[in-house]
Image: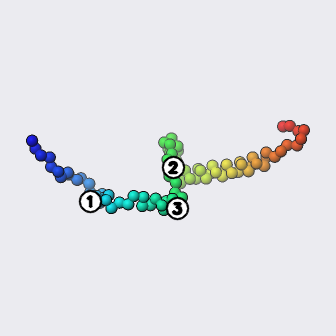
Amino acid sequence: MKIKSKIKDDDLRPEYNFDYSKAIRGKHFKRLLEEGANVIVLEPEIARAFSNSAAVNDALRSLLEITRSTQRLTKRSTGSTKKGISI
């Protein structure tokens, strides 16, 4: 029987050789929490509708603006009716 060589052929380029023993787990976690970074995963059919994250943010800002303006209109128009008058 032949003995298998313990040396594996490493076909990665040297710049991709990373020493994970020196890695720091959660190195940027605290900073991201302090800055308020949120990661949201979109469903595939929603993600296809947007070209990039800026497009998603623009759409959400527009939606918030519409929501706020319609809330103001709704709050103004829902005043109490006069007694005896029904609509």
Q: What SS does tag 3 mark?
A: helix
Q: Residue 40, which numbered label? A: 2
Q: Amino acid at mark 2?
A: Ile
Q: Residue farthest to the top?
A: 86
- The span from disc 3 to disc 1 (Cα, nearest Å) is 35 Å
Please state which of residues 46 and 76 is positioned toward the viewer in this rendering. 76
Quarter of the image with the N terminus in it: top left
- Quarter of the rendering containing residue 87: top right
Q: How crowded is the residue under tag 1: few (<14 C-alpha within 10 Å), some, or many (20+)?
A: few
- The span from disc 3 to disc 2 (Cα, nearest Å) is 17 Å
Q: How crowded is the residue under tag 2: few (<14 C-alpha within 10 Å), some, or many (20+)?
A: few
**Mark 3 vs mark 2: in front:** 3
Q: Residue 75, which numbered label? A: none
Expressed as whole percent of the image width and height from the top left, the position of residue 83 reads: 89, 41
Q: Residue farthest to the right?
A: 84
Q: Is there CB contact under 8 Å for labels 3 and 2? A: no
Q: Amino acid at mark 3?
A: Glu
Of the residues under marks 3 and 2, which one precedes in the sequence? 3
Q: Amino acid at mark 1?
A: Pro
Q: What SS does tag 1 mark?
A: helix
Expressed as whole percent of the image width and height from the top left, the position of residue 43 reads: 50, 42
- The span from disc 1 to disc 2 (Cα, nearest Å) is 34 Å
The residue to which callout 1 is attached is 14
